[in-house]
C-alpha cells in the first residue's frame, strides 16, 4: 500500500452533550501510526445500537461534560487491518472479529468505519465463527448480539442456580433484544423446561418463534400479575425459579410469594433495568441510578433474592455466544439495517421502543 493510501478518513457518529445533536465527525487517520503496541485497528463492517448509546447522549448535561466529541456505539463486527507489536498472536491482520467495545463518553466507538482497540483491556472480542450460512450478512449478524447476550448471561449463570427441564422462568419484557438472547440461552443451552414471557399481544407469535413456551400480553384486561397467575393455574405451572426483568417493572414486588419459589430454594428476581421502564425518548438521570439495589440485595430480612446486573465485558459470555452461534443454537434477530449516514434514522428506530431485534448500522 502506498504511503497516501495509508491515510484514510475516519467517520464516527459522535455528540458533545445533550444540547447538541448526534453528528458524523471526520478525522484523518494514518493507518500505519494510529495504534499502540497493544492495539489493533478494525475496519468496521457492521455495528449495533443499544439503548445505552442514546441514554448516555441524553444524560450528558453541558454543565458536567467536556466539549470533546463522544462516540456512539459498542457492538461491532469487522476485519483486523493493523496490529501492534505486542498484540496476542491470536489476533492477526485479516481476521474477522466481533465484540462489544466498552467505553463511557470515549472518543472511540463502533458507529464508525474504523475502531482502534486495546486487546488487553477490551475483553469482549472474539473471532466470528464460520457458520454454514456465512454470507454477505455475516458481519450484520455478528454485530447483533454481543452486548445483549452479555446482559442476559449473568442472570442465568451468576446466581448459583442450576436449570433443567423442571425449571421455570418468568420473563418481564419478552420482546426486548436482551430477552431474545436470554430465552435462547435458557431453552437451547440450559434446557429450561418452562419459560413464560410478558409482551405486547401483537408480539406473541414473534416471541413463540424464539422459544417462549407461554406468553402473557401486558395490554389485555386485568393486571399483569393477575393474568400471569391465571395462566399458571390454567396450565398447571408452579412457582418460578427465576423472574427476569428486561423492561423495568415493580409489578411483582408486592405479590412475589405467589410467583417466586421460596428464597431458601435459591430462587431469584433479577433485573437489568430497575423498578421503572426507561423513557426511551427522554431517559432520566434519577431513573438511571440504581440506588435501591444495595438494600434489596443485601438486606438480611429480604423476602426474596434480588440482583441487578450490568453487562460486564468478559471472555466467558463471548465464548458461550460464539459457541452457540457456531452450533446453530443462537440466532440474534435483526430489526433493521441502516447506512452510517442514516444514523439518525437508526437512533430514532431504536428510540421508538418497537424494534424487534437489533438495529444495525453499516459504514458504507
Ligand atoms: N443492565 C445492562 O447492562 C443493560 C444492557 C442492555 C440493555 N439494558 C436495558 O434493558 C432494556 C432492554 O434493552 P433492549 O436493547 O433489549 O431493548 P429493545 O430491544 O429496544 O426493546 C424493544 C422492545 O421492548 C418492548 N416493550 C416496549 N414497551 C414495553 C412494555 N411496556 N412492556 C414490555 N415490553 C415493552 C417492545 O416489545 P413489545 O412488542 O412486547 O411491546 C419492543 O420490541 C433497556 O431498558 C436497556 O436500557 C440494560
Image (cartoon, helix red, strand yellow):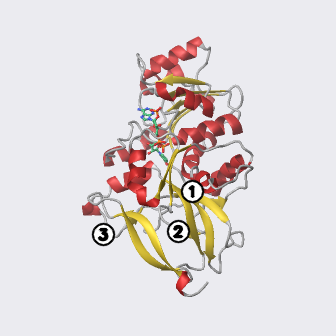
**Residue underneath mark 1:** 313
Which is closer to the viewer, label 3 or label 1? 3
Secondary-structure class at tag 2: strand
Mark carried by residue 67: 3
For mark 3, does the 10 Å Cα neighbourhood hold few (<14), some (14 to 19), or many (20 or more) residues?
Answer: few
Foreground of the two, 289 or 192: 192
| Residue 131 in picture, x, y percent from top left | 73, 51
- CA gap between label 2 and label 3 equals 21 Å
Among numbered discs 2 and 3, the one appearing first in the sequence: 3
| Residue 18 in picture, x, y percent from top left | 29, 57
Foreground of the two, 172 or 31: 31
Compared to 297, does 262 lie above or below? Answer: above
Mark carried by residue 115: 2
Disc 1 residue lies near ligand 1 with CB under 8 A = no
| Residue 136 in picture, x, y percent from top left | 64, 56
Which residue does the image show at 54% across and 51% down from the upper left?
A: 147
**Residue placed furthest toward the bottom:** 3
Amino acid at each position: 500500500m502506498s504511503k497516501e493510501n495509508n491515510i484514510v478518513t475516519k467517520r464516527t457518529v459522535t455528540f458533545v452533550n445533550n444540547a447538541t445533536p448526534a453528528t458524523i465527525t471526520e478525522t484523518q487517520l494514518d493507518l500505519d501510526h494510529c495504534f499502540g503496541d497493544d492495539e489493533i485497528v478494525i475496519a468496521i463492517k457492521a455495528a449495533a445500537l443499544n439503548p445505552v448509546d442514546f441514554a448516555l447522549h441524553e444524560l450528558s448535561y453541558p454543565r458536567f461534560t467536556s466539549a470533546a466529541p463522544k462516540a456512539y456505539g459498542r457492538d461491532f463486527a469487522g476485519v483486523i487491518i493493523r496490529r501492534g507489536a505486542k498484540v496476542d498472536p491470536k489476533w492477526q491482520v485479516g481476521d474477522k472479529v466481533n465484540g462489544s467495545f466498552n467505553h463511557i463518553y470515549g472518543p472511540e466507538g463502533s458507529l464508525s468505519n474504523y475502531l482502534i482497540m486495546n486487546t488487553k483491556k477490551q475483553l469482549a472480542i472474539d473471532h466470528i465463527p464460520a457458520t454454514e450460512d456465512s454470507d454477505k450478512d455475516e458481519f450484520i449478524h455478528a454485530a447483533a448480539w454481543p452486548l445483549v447476550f452479555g446482559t442476559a448471561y449473568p442472570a442465568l449463570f451468576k446466581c448459583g442456580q442450576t436449570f433443567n427441564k423442571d425449571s421455570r422462568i418468568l420473563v418481564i419484557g419478552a420482546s426486548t433484544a436482551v430477552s431474545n438472547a436470554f430465552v435462547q440461552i435458557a431453552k437451547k443451552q440450559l434446557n429450561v423446561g418452562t419459560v413464560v414471557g410478558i409482551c405486547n399481544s401483537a408480539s406473541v407469535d414473534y416471541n413463540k418463534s424464539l422459544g417462549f413456551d407461554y406468553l402473557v400480553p401486558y395490554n389485555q384486561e386485568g393486571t399483569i400479575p393477575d393474568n400471569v397467575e391465571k395462566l399458571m393455574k390454567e396450565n398447571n405451572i408452579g412457582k418460578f425459579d427465576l423472574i427476569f426483568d428486561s423492561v423495568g417493572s415493580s409489578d411483582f414486588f408486592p405479590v412475589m410469594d405467589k410467583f417466586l419459589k421460596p428464597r431458601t430454594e435459591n430462587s431469584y428476581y433479577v433485573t437489568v433495568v430497575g423498578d421503572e421502564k426507561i423513557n426511551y425518548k427522554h431517559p432520566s438521570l434519577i431513573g438511571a441510578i440504581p440506588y435501591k439495589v444495595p438494600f434489596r440485595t443485601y438486606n438480611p430480612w429480604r423476602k426474596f433474592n434480588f440482583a441487578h446486573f450490568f453487562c460486564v465485558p468478559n471472555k466467558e459470555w463471548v465464548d458461550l455466544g460464539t459457541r452457540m452461534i457456531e452450533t446453530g443454537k443462537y440466532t440474534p434477530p435483526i430489526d433493521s439495517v441502516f447506512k452510517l449516514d442514516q444514523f439518525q434514522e437508526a437512533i430514532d428506530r431504536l428510540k421508538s421502543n418497537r424494534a424487534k431485534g437489533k438495529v444495525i448500522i453499516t459504514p458504507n
